[in-house]
Amino acid sequence: MGLAELIEQRRFVGREFLVWLWFESELFEGRFSLDALGACELWLEGQITLVQEKEQSRLKGAAPSNAPEAHEALRQGKLPSQARVRVTRGELEYAFLFNADAFALSGVKIPSVVKDAADEQFYERMYLIEELETLFTALYGEFLALRLSTSWEPAVAPFLRAWVRGEPVDVAAYQKLKARLAPVRGAARSRTPPPPADAPQRAARVVA
């Protein structure tokens, strides 16, 4: 099996990751807790593209993921393939376009660099980019550990499907479930494969 075919078969992983980010950002009003990294905030804003085979819905605006059209596209079986994301941690704020199919970040905007010397500015920029990579990798690790757990289909996925259908989600119950799975997530992070080629070949779709 060629590399292109492997990537194509695992393309759903990035899209489901983006659905999970969308779900948790709405459920917890943008707040994420990343164990040793502490808290951060994440929102989908500016634009989002949802696809299903050859059909595509592209929405733009201040908060397109909150639009009724975006949730209707999810209910129709479309999954997000691209979204503009804003992440803040303390006083640091980042923005970028996440391509879920390629698992790539583009158009990255980092916090303003205030150093005077050119070499200091360079190292500061490298530090900020590394900080963003660390945050995004931690978020992906949280998702993938849940996705690979045996509790995904019977316990985790029903919360996402209820959210997709527009039904009330028991936030306390979901938090309790995540707390119960925390040791499993911690163990899974140590063996988390790189995205997206080493993700599982087959999985039930989030919105099914």
Image (spheres, rainbow, N blue to C red):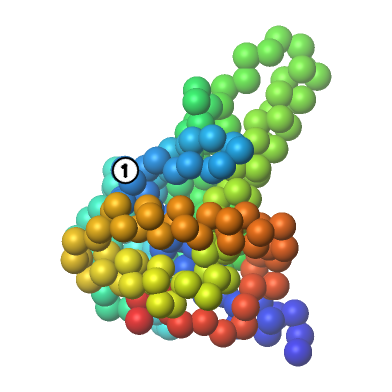
At a point 62% along the width and 78% down the height, the residue shown is 200
* Residue found at the very far top of the displayed protein: 116
Quarter of the figure that contains the C terminus: bottom left
- Can residue 72 be seen in the rendering of this structure? no
Which residue in the structure is indicated by mark 1?
Answer: 29
At a point 68% along the width and 13% down the height, the residue shown is 115
Quarter of the figure that contains the N terminus: bottom right
Q: Report whether 121 appears left or right of 137.
A: right
Amino acid on which the number 1 mark rests in the picture: Glu
Pick the residue in front: 84 or 41: 41
Task: Sort mark 1 into few (<14), some (14-19) or many (20+) by Cα contacts within 10 Å.
Answer: few
**Where's residue 203, x and y in %?**
52, 82
**Where's residue 142, x and y in %?**
55, 55
Q: Report whether 167 appears left or right of 113.
A: left
Q: Report whether 86 appears left or right of 158.
A: right
Pick the residue in front: 84 or 191: 191
At a point 57% along the width and 22% down the height, the residue shown is 112
**Where's residue 204, x and y in %?**
46, 82
**Where's residue 26, x and y in %?**
31, 50
177 lies above or below 113: below
- Can residue 115 be seen in the rendering of this structure? yes
* Residue found at the very far right of the displayed protein: 119
* Count of number-bearing discs: 1
Q: Report whether 170 appears left or right of 147.
A: left
SS for callout 1 = loop
Pick the residue in front: 46 or 66: 66
At a point 56% along the width and 42% down the height, the residue shown is 35
Pick the residue in front: 144 or 85: 144
